[in-house]
Amino acid sequence: MTSDVLIVGSGAAGLTAALNLAERFRVTVLAKGALDEGSTAWAQGGIAAVLEPGDTFESHIDDTMIAGAGLNDRAIVELVVENAPASIERLQRLGVPFATEGPNGNGALHLTREGGHSHRRIVHVDDATGWAVQEALLKAARAHPNITLVPDQVAIDLATSRHEQRYSGAGRVWGVYAVDRGTGAVNLHTANATILATGGAGRTYLFSTAPRGATGDGIAMAWRAGARVANMEFMQFHPTCLYNLEVKNFLITEAVRGEGGRLINPRTGHRFMPDLDLRAELAPRDVVARAIDAEIKRDGLDYVHLDISHMPAEFVRGHFPNIHDKLLGLGIDMTREPIPVVPAQHYTCGGIMVDRHGLTDLPGLYAAGECTQSGLHGANRLASNSLLECFVFGEAAADHIAAHWDSLSPPPPIRPWDESRVADSDEEVVIKQNWTEIRRFMWNYVGIVRTTKRLERARTRIRMMTDEIADYYGSFRVTPDLIELRNLLQTAELIVHCALHRHESRGLHYTLDYPATSPEAEDTILIP
Ligand code: FAD
Ligand code: SIN
């Protein structure tokens, strides 16, 4: 299938780009499963934008740079922060029903508060913002005659000049090979320009708030094709994931702390955050997650408590209707009792290196959203800045493609996928075993608090598994699980490589062997 622009990913970044391109171009959007299965639909808290009287762009920029521990690219932070109010307006025009101060959608937008923000700044749809955003974007994309949405296509690798039937040496990206979940066939999707909007790599870790498909596919594909990847050591752990033996990845939004929730040690009853940081529960995520981790490790706890039961029950139900109902179904009434919580992997700050137009190192390849390292987040993402990044960079990539269309030549004939030397797998157990093993050692050795020794242990395991998985990949027909396993391992390797490279503690990367922060802030850039 050939189109003008191919977009891999149907979340906030991919669909924003598609809608911005569709007036002029034929756009195809692929998703690896259902169209609403990415992280976008799972976002709870909201979208950060300067809208409160007295708030300023300067303040949002400062908060972003402070959370990012000085590693952010200030020009990119300015670009994103200054475009936030316009992004919110566009979403309103698409029908996103943001919460307002007055009843029935009247009055100014209601702004909630999250950690690291010095103002009320978070626009939201109750506690299920992402779902409303995903629905609105999908509705608009479905209605557009120039957008073709193709679910159940798991991209395997980029199709590049190496795959041209007559090699041109142009070094271009021409699209992707993708396996169809229904038929198992490998299809070729080509285009003049390709945008990767494949989301993060949270599932590299045993405990993560991210959906099942967050396996770092875009990052791994871009890396294998020759693009630089940066800052993968900065994996964000959200402080408050529900602790429940059945439901393993349900997020309790930071807005619960923003609206008064307190963190309590369940053994001592002590509220511990005010001892550690002036901002108490509203310190940036890295600080809060480390504090919880320390309480849990010191006292041998399974979890700590997040308590908002001192607020009026009506207020709690009104602000957090979905979380309230979900917890009630699990036997926890958050209006009367505390919620057991633990930190869990939540967001991938590093990724494919892009410039302010979403351009990667590879001609014809753009990237946007969580799969990128744009310079916005630095060493730690400020809460609710990531959906925003998707909107700003989805649009920026679309604008750049439109402005440079004449230089984006159509794809030449590309070789079809070659399955002549592979057989059907007779050892699926290899996939299951390795999936679990990667996620477990990443959690134990490359988690919230690191040491060089533990990182080296993880590196040794990755080396051992690399041969086994390469051998498996070379011998058997590709399946979605095998593609994801290969990408999980690739991503784990990039994370460990970056982490071993950084000889300091900064933002989300905290190592006992280098506890100090270096005076110079430098990105960890990996060159294939
Ligand atoms: P996603 O929305 O993750 O979409 C990825 C897309 O790529 C999917 O369509 C997927 O099918 C497709 N894809 C991936 N691999 C392949 C492949 N191999 N082949 C084909 N398609 C592929 N951020 C905020 O700003 N505010 C919040 O309140 C907030 N809350 C969050 C709550 C949770 C529980 C989580 C997990 C994250 C939250 N985040 C929040 C982060 C934010 O949701 C994500 O960073 C953002 O939605 C990422 O959007 P994206 O478009 O980059 O990718
Ligand atoms: C949350 O609601 O706590 C998540 C916000 C975010 O990840 O930005």
Image: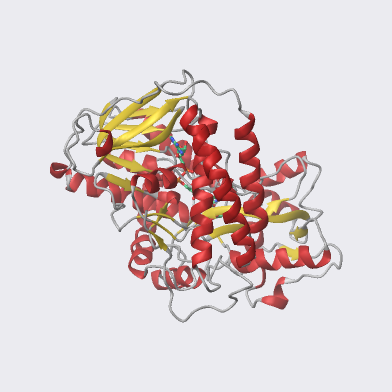
Q: Check the image and report above or below for 517 versus 216.
A: below
Residue found at the far top of this picture: 183
Q: Is residue 490 toward the left or the right of residue 410 in the image?
A: right
Q: Is residue 48 toward the left or the right of residue 512 in the image?
A: left
Residue found at the far left of this picture: 406
Q: Check the image and report above or below for 33 versus 238.
A: above
* Rendered-image quadrant of the N terminus: top left
Q: Check the image and report above or below for 253 versus 505.
A: above
Q: Is residue 211 toward the left or the right of residue 52 in the image?
A: right
Q: Check the image and report above or below for 32 versus 500.
A: above
At x 40%, y 23%, the residue is 419
Q: Which quadrant of the figure has residue 260?
A: bottom right
At x 30%, y 58%, the residue is 356
What is the x, y in percent for residue 373?
41, 57
What is the x, y in percent for residue 408?
18, 41
Residue found at the far bottom of this picture: 519
What is the x, y in percent for residue 489?
53, 45
- Evaluate whether residue 212 shows in this view: yes
Q: Which quadrant of the figure has residue 271?
A: bottom right
- Evaluate whether residue 213 shows in this view: no
Please tell me which residue lies in front, 111 or 402.
402
Residue found at the far right of this picture: 267
Please tell me which residue lies in front, 185 or 43.
185
